[in-house]
Image (tube, rainbow, N blue to C red):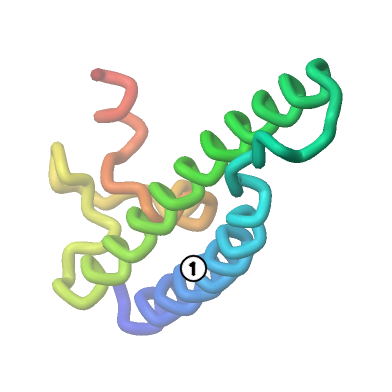
C-alpha cells in the first residue's frame, strides 16, 4: 500500500473515531440507571428498562468498533494495515473503504 493510501485510511479512521466518540458520549445519557422513585407506570417502567437494555447493547457495539478502529491505526503505524491476518494477502480496497477496521479478507472470512 502506498504512503498516500495509508494517509487516506488514517484520515478516514480518525474521522470515524471522532464520530464514534461523539455518538458514544451522547448514548451514555440513554443508559443511565432508571431511578426506582421516578413516578412512571409499571408498563412505562418496563419499556424504559427494555429501551435501556437495547441502548446498552448498542453502546457496547459502538465501543467495540471504536477499539477495532484504534487497533487499525496501530496497524498503520506498524505497517500491517490492509493485510489479512489469516492468509497475509492484501484486503481489497473496497472492503477497507467500507470497514477500515477489517483484519481479514472476505475469502478467509467466509472459510470460517
Identified at 22% across, 54% down, the residue is 83
For residue 37, side relative to residue 5 (left or right):
right
- Taking depth in this image into account, of 20 and 27 the one nearest to the observer is 27
Residue at the outermost front position: 37
Identified at 35% across, 48% down, the residue is 102
For residue 66, side relative to residue 62 (left or right):
left
- Quadrant containing the C terminus is top left
For residue 52, side relative to residue 2 (left or right):
right
- Quadrant containing the N terminus is bottom left
For residue 6, side relative to residue 75 (left or right):
right
Number of on-image labels: 1
Looking at the rendered structure, the secondary structure element under dot 1 is helix
* Residue 18 location (% of width, % of height): 54, 73
* Residue 89 location (% of width, % of height): 20, 47
- Taking depth in this image into account, of 41 and 57 the one nearest to the observer is 41
- Above or below 104: residue 48: above
* Residue 57 location (% of width, % of height): 52, 34
Residue 80: which quarter of the image? bottom left
- Above or below 100: residue 22: below
Q: Residues within 10 Å of mark 1 (few under 14, many from 20)?
A: some
* Residue 109 location (% of width, % of height): 30, 28
Residue for badge 1: 17
- Above or below 112: residue 52: below
Identified at 71% across, 38% down, the residue is 37
Amino acid at each position: 500500500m502506498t504512503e498516500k493510501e495509508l494517509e487516506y485510511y488514517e484520515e478516514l479512521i480518525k474521522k470515524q473515531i471522532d464520530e464514534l466518540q461523539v455518538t458514544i458520549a451522547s448514548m451514555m445519557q440513554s443508559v443511565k440507571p432508571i431511578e426506582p422513585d421516578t413516578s412512571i407506570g409499571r408498563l412505562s417502567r418496563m419499556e424504559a428498562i427494555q429501551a435501556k437494555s437495547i441502548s446498552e447493547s448498542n453502546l457496547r457495539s459502538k465501543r467495540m468498533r471504536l477499539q477495532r478502529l484504534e487497533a487499525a491505526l496501530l496497524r498503520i503505524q506498524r505497517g500491517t494495515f490492509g493485510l489479512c491476518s489469516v492468509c497475509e494477502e492484501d484486503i481489497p480496497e473496497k472492503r477497507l473503504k467500507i470497514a477500515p477496521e477489517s483484519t481479514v479478507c472476505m475469502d478467509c472470512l467466509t472459510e470460517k
